[in-house]
Amino acid sequence: MKQTRRILTRTSSFIFFALTLAFAFLPVAASADEASDLQAKINQRNTDIQSLEKEIKDYQSQIATLNGQESTLTSAIQTLTLTEKK
């Protein structure tokens, strides 16, 4: 009887200890999942930012080209206007 009671006490103590450890580490595992999810979102945002920066550079290049064409066209119009007045 005492032997059985001692075994039950040890077994229940072990189960209690194991459950305590399991519940103690659950928040750490959940936190690690949240951290990896956040890191994935950060990485995606950085990729999006790089893509947008490239797009901005492309637009700036197109604007510079158009500004050059505008100068050429303005000069051509002024030349034609002067020629017409003669």
Image (cartoon, grey):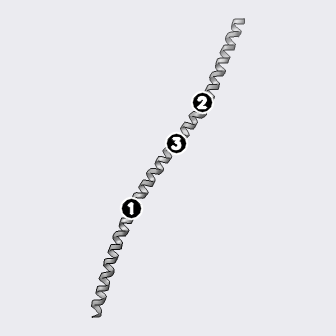
Q: Residue furthest bottom?
A: 86
Q: Which mark is residue 57?
A: 1
Q: In the image, which is nearer the foreground, mark 3 or mark 2? A: 2
Give the left or right position of residue 53, taking residue 74 as reference: right
**Within the image, what quadrant is residue 84 found in?**
bottom left
Task: Identify the residue at horizontal 49%, vertical 44% (top origin).
Answer: 40
Task: Identify the residue at horizontal 36%, vertical 65% (top origin).
Answer: 61
Q: Give the amino acid type for the residue marked by disc 3 in the picture.
A: Asp
Would you call the spot at circle 1 few (<14 residues within 10 Å), some (14-19), or many (20 or more)?
A: few
User: Which callout, 1 or 2, points at the residue further toward the start of the chain?
Assistant: 2
Would you call the spot at circle 3 few (<14 residues within 10 Å), some (14-19), or many (20 or more)?
A: few
Give the left or right position of residue 59, taking residue 20 as reference: left
Q: In the image, which is nearer the foreground, mark 3 or mark 1? A: 1
C-alpha gap between disc 1 and disc 2 = 48 Å
In the displayed structure, 11 sits above or below 72; it is: above
Q: Give the amino acid type for the residue marked by disc 1 in the picture.
A: Lys
User: Which callout, 3 or 1, points at the residue further toward the start of the chain?
Assistant: 3
In the displayed structure, 4 sits above or below 72; it is: above
Horizontal and vertical percent for residue 70?
A: 34, 76
Find disc 3 in the rendering and name its residue.
37
Q: Give the amino acid type for the residue marked by disc 2 in the picture.
A: Phe
Find disc 2 in the rendering and name its residue.
25
Task: Identify the residue at horizontal 62%, vertical 29% (top origin).
Answer: 24
